[in-house]
Amino acid sequence: MKPTVISQDTPWGEIPSLLLPAYGETWLMVAIVMLFVVTLGGLVGVVLFNASPRGLFPHALLYRLLNWVVNMGRSLPFLVLMAAIIPFTYWLTGTTIGIPPR
């Protein structure tokens, strides 16, 4: 399959035939990643719960390690959002952090 680039003179009638296969490919990529993440996350969650003090096989070191990994992973989307809105923050306030000096 050769890559397709939509130029400025692409007729409107051709755009759906270019976009529809891309939608299918996008959903396939999302489904594959989601299957992987749900499987891995489910396994980590089961091990995390069972290693907790009230789990089937309490293991303090494993629990603390997995808990730290999960908490770091949960904070990544927020960090990405913070980095993504830096240009908007600069446009809105004139600074990226704090109040500008007077």
Image (cartoon, helix red, strand yellow):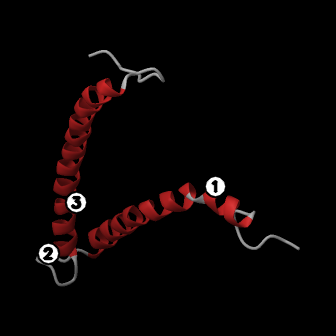
Q: Which residue is mark 2?
A: 57
Q: Of circles 3 and 1, which is in front? A: 1
**Alpha carbon distance from label 2 to label 1:** 48 Å
Q: Position of residue 60 (x, y in %)?
A: 28, 76
Q: Position of residue 89 (x, y in %)?
A: 64, 63
Q: Residues within 10 Å of mark 2 (few under 14, many from 20)?
A: few
Q: Is residue 92 above or below residue 34?
A: below
Residue 30 lies in quadrant: top left
Q: Label 1 amino acid?
A: Pro
Identify the element where label 1 is drawn: helix
Q: Label 3 amino acid?
A: Gly
Q: Is residue 13 above or below residue 38?
A: above
Between disc 2 and disc 1, whose residue precedes? 2
| Residue at (26% x, 16% y) in the render | 1
Instruction: Please state if 24 lies on the left or on the right of 71 as rendered.
Output: left
Q: Of circles 2 and 1, which is in front? A: 1
Q: Which residue is mark 1?
A: 87
Q: Label 2 amino acid?
A: Phe
Q: Which residue is mark 3?
A: 41
The quadrant in which the C terminus is found is bottom right
Instruction: Please state if 24 lies on the left or on the right of 82 as rendered.
Output: left
Question: Given the current orientation, which residue lies at the most extreme right position?
Answer: 102
Which mark is drawn over residue 22? Answer: none
